[in-house]
Amino acid sequence: MGKQKAGKSVFNCKACGGNFPKWSGQCPDCGGWNTLEEGVAAVDSSAKNPRFAGYAGDASKNRVQMLADVKPESEGRFPTGIGELDRVLGGGLVSGSVVLIGGDPGIGKSTLLIQTLARLSDQLSTLYVSGEESPE
Ligand SMILES: [Zn+2]
């Protein structure tokens, strides 16, 4: 066998048709053994192969940025009026978000949330739903 001419080598699977930049004994897609054969990429294989069309394919549109260049987006925060809770939440509740409150039994999760809803109910419609028995 002579050397490959111009064009990038690809390894095509005889069984499933997948193509890969590197040879491997087992096809990463179908799992077949010794099914990869070397060939030359006809065109840009990333354009046709759905294997490369996922998240990484979007990188051309959504350019990778340095962290320092990422502009902070400010979400509107709705203060609950409970100072310590607002501090932990970064200034208040974000519309459409979900907050999970966790802690040991009896630590005051329900009390905190009832107090919070009592305050918020001055300005908003609130609903408290509990799956636990209320203490006697
Ligand atoms: Zn395969």
Image (cartoon, rainbow, N blue to C red):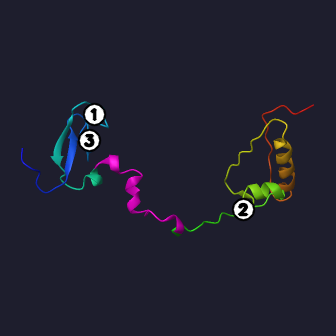
Magenta range: 49-68
Q: Is residue 45 left or right of residue 78?
A: left
Q: Amino acid at mark 2?
A: Arg
Label 1 Cα neighbours within 10 Å, binned few <14 / some 14-19 / many ≥20: some
Q: Amino acid at mark 1?
A: Gln
The residue under the point 22% across, 33% down is 15
Label 3 Cα neighbours within 10 Å, binned few <14 / some 14-19 / many ≥20: some
Tell me residue 86's x, y (percent): 78, 58
Q: Nearer the viewer, mark 1 or mark 2?
A: 1
Spatial CA distance of label 1 from label 2 is: 52 Å
Per the rendering, the mark at residue 77 is 2
Spatial CA distance of label 2 from label 3 is: 48 Å
Pointer 1: what residue? Answer: 26
Q: Nearer the viewer, mark 1 or mark 3?
A: 1
Per the rendering, the mark at residue 18 is 3
Label 2 Cα neighbours within 10 Å, binned few <14 / some 14-19 / many ≥20: some
Is ligand 1 within 8 Å of the beta carbon of the residue shown at mark 2? no
